[in-house]
Image (spheres, rainbow, N blue to C red):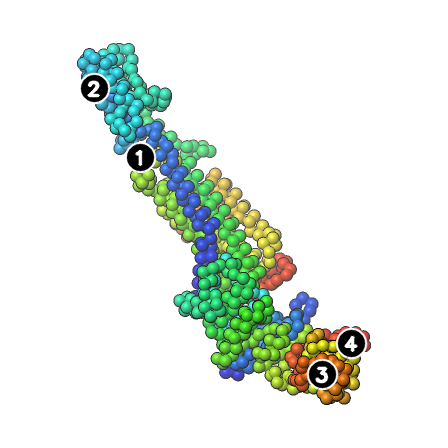
Amino acid sequence: MSSYAVRVEGVTKRFSGHTAVKSLSLDVPTGGIFGLLGPNGAGKSTSIRMMMDIIEPDEGKIMLFGSEKSPREMSERLGYLPEERGLYKKMKVLDQLVFLGEIKGLKTSEAKRRSLAWLERLGLGEWSQKKVEDLSKGMQQKVQFAGTLLHDPDLVILDEPFSGLDPVNSQVMKDVVVDIAKSGRTVLFSTHIMEQAEKMCDRVVIIARGEKVVDGSLAEVKAEFGGNHIALEFTHDKERAARILADRQLIARVDDYGASAEVELASTGTADALLAALVGEGVGLRRFEVVEPSLQSIFIAKVGDAAKAPANQEVA
Amino acid sequence: MSKTFAVIRREFIARVRTRAFVITTLILPVMMVLIAVIPALMMRGGDRTMRIALVDGTSDSLGSRIASALAAERLTRDSLAPARYDVTRVAASGRVTALRDSLVAFTGLSRDKNPESFDGVLVISDSTVVTGRADYLGTNTSSFESMGQLEGSISKVLAQTRLAQSGLDPSVVANAIRPADLNATKVSDGKATGQSGAASFAIAYFMAFILYISVILYGQQTMTSVIEEKTSRIMEVIASSMRPFQMLLGKILGVGTTGLLQMAIWGGTYYLISSQRGRLASLFGVSAAAMQSLPIPVMSTDLLIVFLVYFTLGFMLFGALYAAIGSICNTVQETQQYASVVTVTLMISFFSVFAVMKDPTGGLGVTLSFVPFFSQLVMPVRYSLAAVSAGELVLSLAIGVAALLAVTWLAGRIYRTGILMYGKKPTFRELFRWVRQG
């Protein structure tokens, strides 16, 4: 058996006129949490749908668990949460979960037992006999999440699992995802929220406009991106920093968040020089830390470049 | 297979649990029972046994003969029906008026408090034979029917008495005055339609109508549920867990089982009402005879089975088409263009039923009862109106099942592609391509 849970080889998918995914190759190793990152419309969902064999690639092939079999034949080992959430609105929560378990091959009694356990775990115990439409959106999302995991799949594919969740529910889901990874199973999730990915993922792939721009473990990605990055947090007189941050001798790139900023030093700049300049100008600092580049800044840099590329070509 | 079963169960439960299903399923049987029982209940008031006191002022046996003639009258022609009159003969021995008045005092009182109360007092005297005059004082004198029946009964005895007085043998007289018994048979287009012609006509029409309505209603439900799955994207979860054909099959069978349950309850109720009138009558405390007179055509067991089998077949055939249509559309509005094709087919099929009713053994009816999309409505109707051989039935069913398999296969092809297509509706040419693709 291959040590890859998912192997995508040179996959291309075109939709009437535009190419959603362009010769994409990626490997998701067995075990751990894998992040499929990219801006909106980058082709994340299309890639995931192809992995689930919901749509077929025009070129290339995809293997799950190193097997040539269709994902549908291995659906007992797969859990899939689609991007656009949906449940049968008129169905009772418990019935719904039992149904989702049954179509993954669970026996009715077993599906029922596990559903109740999951509802309890997600704090929805007393909602089991309510209709889905009576639940809040966040609760519905948790129910669907439970439905995805009911049959203890070896590979869990989650399309934007955290979108639309409040911090509390987000935390609950995160804990579940981490638990799955701890038990040696594989989680692949897509997101465009980099903070989440940075905290959770062992490996990431960033795609933009259907093409892969970054691939590797988080450490590799950061090392490869390189550069000296400094995280700043301001207390007062931030406006006085403007001139310094604009100095291209000192600073190559700024990611300004208002009360904080992440900067990449230019090859001619040093951390000492930047600190001296800021202090000399009287900028109030709460934090000055030499850091690894954040996934966010890597994402902005890479995806921004990719987005600019065709514009430059047009100029040239 | 267990996945298909999970879909069947889901579709079945999702439908059966709705209030609309429970109400429509129960209300029709209740109405059927009411329609069967209410007229009998209402007739009970007018057509009950009358307690009559007969003041016998005759010096010969005329009074007692009238009394026994009245006692022999039944409420209906059925010899087992309850007696029309409960006669108490009182010999007047000269005091006719006094006796009559004392009995009138016991007449027309509330039955509940005075079970011995009379409905009327009939006075017969010696002169009755000659003049034909008899006095009757009662509560029901305004009912032409009651008075007519009473007059008729008395007239018969008077006629017998007068003829006997002229020296005729009483048995000859009894034979001579036996009434005619009209046996009515409907003739249509120069042909006798059989004894229950009108009755089976009604049952055929009713069946065709129920089939037509429920195939359309359940078909539309199948279509909407596919669209709901598409818009809620639950389709993606299901599509990644089982083959689209399993999904389609589960859906059609699930909705089909629901429809079959409803039809079985409706058809079964009708079957029971028409075949178990006696029990139903005693259940509601009305006379069996009164129930018997109701125009409920009897539905035979084999007709019930044929009806249910063809319903199931038609239901799944049209259901597969409706599911395929649902799969290629994103909103219910969008379905109209495609659904109208199916609905028009069904309507033509429904209207052709009228041609079959007119001439169940004609070429059109016989042909259509083998043609898929028509046979589902036509065959049960034809079966109810005319003799259909077992061979014909088997052939028609075999063609129907073959058509069902072909249509389900075709629908499965369209469904497979359609369920995951969002956006523009496909053209008929594109649909054709989907079907051809391996």
- The first of marks 3 and 4 along the sequence is 3
Q: What is the quadrant of the C terminus of chain B in the image?
A: bottom right
Q: Which one is in front, B330 or B174?
A: B330
Amino acid type indicated by mark 2: Val
Q: Do the dots labelled 1 and 3 sit on one chain? A: no
Q: Which residue is mark 1?
A: B287
Q: Residues within 10 Å of mark 3 (few under 14, many from 20)?
A: many
Judged by depth in the image, the label closer to the viewer, 3 or 4, is 3
Locate residue B273 relative to residue A173 in the image: left or right. Answer: left
Report if the CB atoms under discs 1 and 4 are less than 8 Å apart.
Answer: no
Label 3 to label 4, Cα distance in Å?
Answer: 23 Å
Tag 1's secondary structure?
loop
Query: Disc 1 residue type?
Result: Ser
A85 shown above or below B58: below
Question: For the residue carrying disc 4, how many other residues have a C-alpha within 10 Å: few (<14), some (14-19), or many (20+)?
Answer: few
Task: Please tell me in which quadrant of the rendered image residue B398 appears.
Answer: bottom left
Q: Please, is residue B135 above or below residue B209 in the view?
A: above
Task: Tell me which residue sits at (58%, 50%) in the image.
Answer: B340
Indicate which label's residue lies in the foreground, 2 or 1: 2
Q: Which residue is mark 2?
A: B90
The quarter of the rendered structure image containing the N terminus of chain B is bottom left
Tell me the residue at 45%/63% (across/down). Answer: A126
Q: Residues within 10 Å of mark 1 (few under 14, many from 20)?
A: many
